[in-house]
Amino acid sequence: MFKKIKKRDGKIVNFNAEKISDAIAKAGLATEEFKAEKAKKLAEKVLKRAEGTIKTRTPSVEQIQDIVEEILMESSYKKTAREYIRFRQERSRIREAKSDLMNIYKTISHADASEDSDVKRSNANVDGNSAMGKMLQFGAEGSKVFAKSVLLRPDIAAAHDNGDIHIHDLDFYATGTLTCCQSDPFVLFENGGFNTGHGHLRTPNSIGSYAALAAILLQANQNEQHGGQSIPNFDYAMAPGVDKSFRKALKRNLEKYNKFAGKKLELKVKDTIKYGDDDKLKKDKWPKEVVEASNEDVEKETLQAMEGFVHNLNTMHSRAGAQVPFTSINFGTDTTPSGRLVSLDLLQATENGLGKGETPIFPISIFKVKSGVNYEEGDPNYDLFKKSMEVSAKRLFPNFCFIDAPYNLKYYKKGDYRTEIATMGCRTRVFASVFPESDGIVTGRGNCSFTTVNLVRIGIKHGICLKERKEADWDGFYKELDEKMDLVKDELLERFEFQANQHVRNFPFLMGQGNWFGSEKLGWNDTLRDVIKHGTLSIGFIGLAETLVAMVGKHHGEDEDARELGLDIITHMRERCDDYCKKYHLNFSLLATPAEGIAGRFTKIDRKEFGKIKGVTDRDFYTNSFHVPVYYPISAFDKIDIEAPYHNLCNAGHITYIELDGDPSQNLPAFEAVIRKMHDAGIGYGSVNHPVDRDPVCGFSGIIKGERCPHCGRLEGDVSFERLGVKSC
């Protein structure tokens, strides 16, 4: 009989035969093939064979377990044998995951974020070198291991690890959070204010307070979600703050006027005067100089409020101080004087930049374009549309969201901002719904979770790129695509169930303050199923261009036939998502996945398995969603025409980027032509990328060619030039 046994970590401990019996009994109990007494007899056979075959006095755990497998396989209990083998493999996978986690922790602890480390660079919005950034990464990586080891089905976890799919924000899986929310400040501001969990903030009474609370709203919500935060109606929501500030300014200036002129004019509560209400001001015979002074006051205050809002969102932190909130705001369609002033001054604040002239990264601003509102000359907000293009040509933002695209326009109701399409900066779109009460409503809704299919890998396996066949195997391609989509569907449903069983108390701001659609009807201890059903479950894809090259040798930017094949693939994916909607009565949708986080991961895995394939795995990244590759020479208009049909298909989110090499602020007609082409082609969401360089010493902002600042002549040295507008994959 053995007295000692060697564990996997090399430690020598006392041999305990009962552990063999217990392990066999657990397997037998799981299959219901036998009970403890039979397990003891099987364990005796294991010991007898071990003593006869193992020559060392101190066997290893692996040697004993190998013999257990042999004995079970030789018995009539085949189900139990398979269960024991499965359990052993699962334990082995968990041990390996823990070992990998320790190596990841070493990387987080010792590597620099600038080094070639996917872990340290997994979230560009987190300072991976800061103490709190490291703390967030420690928690995130440990949480991923827990999710894969305990919460996910083994086949789904394996599919994520081997690169068949990518479960986004896996580190937040165990928390039950949702991805993002399109918050309506009216809900929180106009009903007595809101509570962030550390105190109550009452209804704001000035544009400065409105802007400050809007930033706090976004920060508070970010602490309870793993994705971005959006305000879809920023101009509408801030306009009441302008009017309140105007009334205060009018009252203040009336007091000065009365003192100077010896009058007793009084602003009464019943006087519902708003900023820009010139007809009423004239009719009520308010002194002209008082009105003009009040206008000047509120215009100055509004610009300061918008500058403060932009500065706050680039400096205030969320998630234990590890990152600034990922924020987006949509604006440009409120035609009231107050709403127009908000839009104008937000654009001006963006153009002015931060304290030293830096281009602000947040909020990602999105100008909503609508014919009859701001698109044509004569439209009430046409001047704002022109201004938005001037600012974007200088500062990269705003991006442009097109209400007139047919799939957006069908929901539009004039005067109802809830029906104006809005987006969350990276591209996420939440609009249609299988539930009538939320169908075509943007406010209070968001994405629950999303997972991406590695489309390129399927193309490699069934295409001509490996030279294993002369023609693409389309039947095999679609069969495997359906299998992967079904796997992702299962994962999204499992995650939805986990999220649905969370409680309002787990999300005291998002749900407890009524920020999410319908959550105001829930009690503190209620679960969330009845409200998160209004969110979306999104299936994403990446690398359509490389998929087509793998399948037929050319991508959709260079070949008409490939263009049709690309549309066929994405149409098939959209139809399958629509089928899931009908079958499960949930908002499944198709996402044109942003590539920044996972393009390199998929490529590394596929290159290791299939080698370097020209046009497929020979670069460091797969192309963003349905985009024509950024390295392929093509005119802006042709790129827009090719990508436009995909916007209609990708109802969970989409974007088209146009890359300009020069300084578009020096050629605004060309910039405007690109934006108008997007509108007319049916693009839903578009952006123009271009170089934005800055010399932090002299403050010059523009294009810096080479190593010398064109303004002050300084050579780039210890103080580097800031360069934005990096090409998007």
Image (cartoon, rainbow, N blue to C red):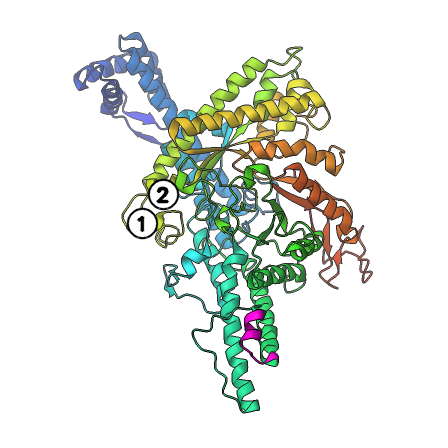
The answer to if 283 sits in the magenta stretch is yes
Residue 176: name its quadrant.
Answer: top left
Residue at the disc numbered 2? 531
Of residues 249 and 217, the one drawn nearer to the viewer in this rendering: 249
* Main secondary structure type of the part rendered in magenta: helix
User: Would you say 140 lies left or right of 340 here?
Assistant: left
- Bin the neighbour count of mark 2 within 10 Å (Cα to Cα): few under 14, some 14-19, many 20 and up: some
Residue sticking out furthest to the front: 283
Type of amino acid at the residue the image marks with label 1: Lys
Q: Residue at x 64, y 11 (%)?
A: 468
Of residues 271 and 29, the one drawn nearer to the viewer in this rendering: 271
Q: Is residue 102 visible?
A: yes
Residue sticking out furthest to the left: 37
Is residue 534 placed above or below 57 in the rendered structure?
A: below
Type of amino acid at the residue the image marks with label 2: Val
Please provide percent x and percent y for residue 316: 51, 59
- Bin the neighbour count of mark 1 within 10 Å (Cα to Cα): few under 14, some 14-19, many 20 and up: few
Residue at the disc numbered 1? 521
For the C terminus, give its image quadrant: top right
The tag on residue 353 is none
What is the secondary structure assignment of the residue under circle 1?
A: helix
* Alpha carbon separation for disc pair 1 and 2: 9 Å
